[in-house]
Amino acid sequence: MSAIDDLPPLRDIIRDHSLSARKSLGQNFLLDLNLTARIARAAGPLEDSTVIEIGPGPGGLTRALLALGAKRVIAIERDERATAALDYVVKRYPGRIEIVHGDAQRFDPRPYLDGGKAKIVANLPYNIATHLLVDWLSIEPWPPWYDTMVLMFQREVAERIVAHEDDEAYGRLAVLANWRAETKILFDISPAAFVPQPKVTSSVVRLIPRAAPEPCNRRMLEQVAAAAFGQRRKMLRQSLKSLSVDPERLAAAAHVDATRRAETVPVAGFVAMARELADIRSIK
């Protein structure tokens, strides 16, 4: 019996279904059910929640979410071996879990939500984690179909998500993430907790979408951030030239000197420059 339910140990499930982790799928299985329960609890009360999970693998986090009361779990799994292995969870929690075999990068959960909100809780496959996050932060219209994200990343990526100006990790991802969400690293997880062991520490990050981010055109914000951080060691008056507008005008809109570098400009400054760029290009 495990620490959270009466189901078999995860190592037995992996053995019985020949579910060895595949590097091509970015798989690293978290087998410590105390840790999976800690991740599940980080999403807040689950009793009335629908949870979207990406890459459940042998089902450690899936089991924690259900054992802690999630009303419904929709688990998206690309690996057919894992889809079959999760049948033991489906039988243990009938009517509360749906396994969707498919690619998370192409999955639209909205038809499953009946117009309601969901939580996204996942140990994301490393090879698509950043891509998925950017997609979720780029949803239009805003606010999105989720009210909380609790996600695991490599520590380096987590630091890039939560960074603020003057932090070494501050860049395009931090601008987008902190414009649209409140971000926080909750705790780290040692490589030793995974099978196979990754070479890096992982971190669990919570993102709460802002109901009303500072208004600006998202695409303009992305363009300004891409230009500024594309030449991050150069001054704004040089790096922003790639936008084919007057860099001095954009910097003035953000109330910053054009001799500053991108990593010193707060998110609000990038938002102001994005609004000015949209105005110059007559984009609403």
Image (cartoon, grey):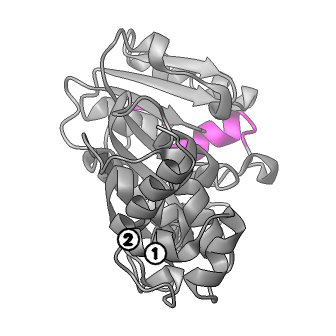
- Tell me the element at label 2: loop
Residue range highlighted in magenta: 5-19
- Is residue 18 on the magenta stretch? yes
The quarter of the image holding the N terminus is top left
Q: Which residue is mark 1?
A: 251
Left-right relation of 130 to 218: right
Q: Which residue is mark 2?
A: 254
Q: x and y percent of residue 136 in the render?
A: 49, 40
Name which residue lies at 42% across and 28% down: 141
The amino acid type of the residue labelled 1 equals Ala
Query: Which of the 4 image quarters holds residue 16?
Result: top right
Q: x and y percent of residue 255 in the render?
A: 34, 76
Question: Up-down: is 3 above or below 253?
Answer: above
Question: Up-down: is 85 above or below 271?
Answer: above
Name which residue lies at 43% across and 18% down: 97
Question: Up-down: is 150 above or below 204?
Answer: above
The amino acid type of the residue labelled 2 equals Ala
Q: Nearer the viewer, residue 216 or 144?
A: 216
